[in-house]
Image (tube, rainbow, N blue to C red):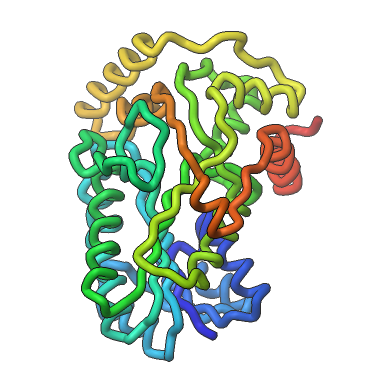
Amino acid sequence: MRVMLTGATGFLGGHVLGRLLADDVEVTAVVRSQAAARNLGERGVRSVVGSLEDPLILREALDLPTDAVFHIAADTSTWRGHAERQTRTNVEGTRNVLAAAEAAGVRRFVHTSSVSAFGQQEQTLNETSPRLGKNSWINYERTKAMAEELVLEADARGRIETMVLNPAHILGPGDRHNWASMFLLIDQGKLPGAPPGSGAFADVREVAKAQIAAWHHPQHGEQFLLGGVQASFLELIQAIALELDRKSPVRAMPAGFIRGYARVLDAMSRLTGREPSLTPQAVSFTCHHLKVDSTKAIRELDYQTTPRNVLVHDTCVWLREEGMLKAP
């Protein structure tokens, strides 16, 4: 069997790629650089170098008979200065990948969306919750909701079977840029404080496993929320600090203070044109209390929740092996 994979060099994409290769699935990856193509080539992956904005590149990637497309690539920036780029990647890129897959006669399209497509709601999210992200002031939420809508519309047209996965906050081994930055700041004693929000923290390995299960699921046109252990950001930070034997805050910072600080940085960035270290959009995520019900994924995809301390420990072990943390 052969699949096409976008985002193969990323955090989640790398785990999905590993599972596919372990199952002896032939993979064609769309990557942005020749260096990435060479690295994947050493693992037996066929790569096509180019952008998701280029239909010709996608046509080339699908020139061999392909059973499924895993669309994972996304722009996760929270800075308004990246909004146009983000919209091109998340919305137009998804539109292009869908069109190429339909034209090539691909049977199944597994799309990685996000709980952000639902917007920030106070209720516990499940698959029947209203999708409010399309009207959000945060471009990431808007673009993920718009892309998800395109995927569901494609399934309704009947030319391709689609499945949509909505992960919450993803943690785990293999992360170099996302939540790993929090681990590094705590390790270096540079974390300014804990935000007052809370979240659902998913194990990247379980999210990757769910991707493969969605490919083989007997139904289509389905959505699955992939949550995880519920914890406040303060609790997560304290667990990481305990694992690293570092100091941790004893209470969360006031939301008003963090929001005010982010607004100051945002105003400065409008003058300098440089991305700030903290944005109002990022603050909105970390002051929100995200709650996710994964019952459907647990029942139908064999999705599992990893205990917080296990997830933190495994992530720290990997970061140490990669030399990204200080010696104990």
Q: Seen in the image, is 10 located left or right of residue 106?
A: right
Q: Seen in the image, is 55 located left or right of residue 189?
A: left
The image quadrant where one finds the C terminus is: top right
Q: Hey, which residue is sitting farthest bottom in the picture?
A: 64
Q: Where residue 214 appears, x then y in whole percent?
A: 49, 65
Residue 57: quarter of image: bottom left
Q: Nearer the viewer, residue 45 or 325?
A: 45
Q: Where residue 180 appears, x then y in whole percent?
A: 58, 38
Can residue 93 be seen here? The reply is no
Q: How many numbered circles does the render carry?
A: 0
Residue drawn at (50%, 57%), measured in percent from left and top?
A: 10
Q: Nearer the viewer, residue 11 or 311?
A: 311
Is 311 placed above or below 193 here? below
Q: Hey, which residue is sitting farthest right in the picture?
A: 328
Q: Where residue 4 appears, x then y in whole percent?
A: 45, 76
Q: Seen in the image, is 112 located left or right of residue 205?
A: left
The image quadrant where one finds the N terminus is: bottom right
Q: Seen in the image, is 164 located left or right of residue 27?
A: left
Q: Where residue 260 appears, x then y in whole percent?
A: 31, 13
Residue drawn at (62%, 49%), measured in percent from left and top?
A: 304
Residue drawn at (27%, 49%), measured in percent from left and top?
A: 145
Can residue 25 be seen here? The reply is yes
Is 19 placed above or below 265 here? below
Is 306 placed above or below 103 here? above
Residue drawn at (42%, 78%), measured in percent from left and top?
A: 48
Residue 258: quarter of image: top left
